[in-house]
Amino acid sequence: MTDAEIRAVALATLLSIAPEVEVDELRGDRTLRSQVDLDSMDWLNFLLGLHEKLKVEIPEADYAKLITLDDVVAYLQKKLGAG
Amino acid sequence: MIEFKLPALGSDMDEGTLLEWKVGVGDTVKKGQVVAIVDTTKAAVDIESWQEGTVHELIAEIGKKMPVGTVMALLLEAGETAPKVGAGGTAKPVPTAAPAIAAAAPVAAPAPAAAPAAPGRRMISPAARKHAEEKGVDLDSITGTGPHGAVTLEDVEKTAAAPPAAAAEKPAAKAGDQQAARAADMRKTIAAAMSRSKREIPHYYVAEDIPLAKALAWLQSANAQRPMAERLLPAALLLKAVAMALKRYPELNGYWRDGGFIPVAAINLGVAISLRQGGLIAPALLNADDKPLTLLMQELTDLVKRTRAGSLRSSEMNEATITVTNLGDQGSNSVFGVITPPQVALVGFGRVAERPWAEAGGLKVLPVVTASLSADHRVSDGHRGALFLLELNELLQRPEELEK
């Protein structure tokens, strides 16, 4: 998958949890959870959605690495490449 | 004959609007069965029956507001026969299912035209017809404002002058207006309930900083062995600890009614859940003390999902015995909440964050949460409240004991 395809999956997953999000206004290099009001349950569901769509396992120990949308895309790309 | 009345789905509800009947005349109703869907200012709620019987008459009308306590339906008890009615009639069967109605405010019937036109033929002035042809305006799309609904030249001119997108924008604007009105209703409801709480309940507040190093380490270890869908959040552990601590402090779990405190044996935690469109609802996790952590987490996930989807049950709305509000990792350091009447206490958790922690003459950095208790001074005092928080602290230092 390309980065753009992964980003599209991530944004679709995000929209399923926070439908009010204006995708065009999201900055990929800024903290995702400060731009979108996601509580811990939303965040867990976001990661679970990515896991289900991309079949990528995301250990809890890696949660801290996923700060921005760019982080999420890079992390998933690495995981998909390794798989 | 059993009178099935509209229940109060929380202290902040005065009225509701029937959206749909889920039963029909002649149907047998069991305990816990959903019989209707009612819209409050906060959510569409499945109304359950707590009595068994056979539906004799459906009285409440779909789309109409009714005060709490209104008799919505009559049920025959087991063995009871329908009373004879006078000449002219039997109880009228009411349609059991309405067309799908969104959980928004009921849609008003379209306003009738000033006077209906004669069927079969529309009245259109010759000048209007000619002008419509010249401008390419579809006459069928115009609502006439002339005598007997006639389409006038002015009607055609207005339609021709309107920007093409205007017509398409109307439904969206209407939906936006409805959403704004609903949000305003919810704020009014919350304000009324919280004002009443502050007016009637003499609140006191205590707080305790609780180190969570052991609890979070235990969670991390437990989650490492679980598939993603079964991982536990710290919120589940905090809720279970509150439920267990309440067993030793029953004066915080129950209701203030008719000038006195009524303790409740069941520990039903009202969980404050924020809605994405604004506002909050605090439905209950029933019998939280009896549930293993895994089940509690599943039920919490389900409750949050259904709350945000507007699909709650009446028992979840009116059986909370205490409320817990958890600001989570995006929140502030601490929260001191307003008690939800007729409950007598509220537990608040701030953000879990690393803080300096002095212990045994040394200083270290630990994840810490500030737990607070807002409680009713008519029922308990600060000393007992402080002891409750200490118990909560101790329970969270032994997280493995909270698992079962």
Image (cartoon, grey):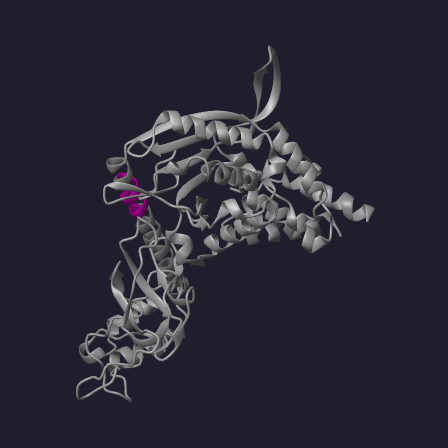
Q: Residue at x 25, y 60 (%)?
A: B69
Quarter-wise, where is residue B385 in the image? top left
Q: Is residue B201 visible?
A: yes
**In-image side of B112 versus B268 (left or right):** left
- Give the total number of marks visible in the rendering: 0
Quarter the N terminus of chain B occupies: bottom left
Q: Residue furthest right?
A: A82
The prevailing secondary structure element of the residues shown in magenta is: helix
Quarter the C terminus of chain B occupies: top right
Q: Residue at x 23, y 86 (%)?
A: B118
Q: Residue at x 46, y 39 (%)?
A: B247
Quarter-wise, where is residue B339 in the image? top left
Q: Position of residue A54 (x, y in %)?
A: 71, 53
Q: Residue furthest front?
A: B79
Indicate whether B350 appears above or below B131: above
**In-image side of A64 versus B353 (left or right):** right
Q: Is residue A7 visible?
A: no
Q: Position of residue B85 (x, y in %)?
A: 20, 84
Bounds of the magenta segment: B188-195
**In-image side of A44 versus B337 (left or right):** right
Magenta segment: does it hold B144?
no
**In-image side of B44 versus B201 (left or right):** right
Q: Residue furthest top?
A: B361
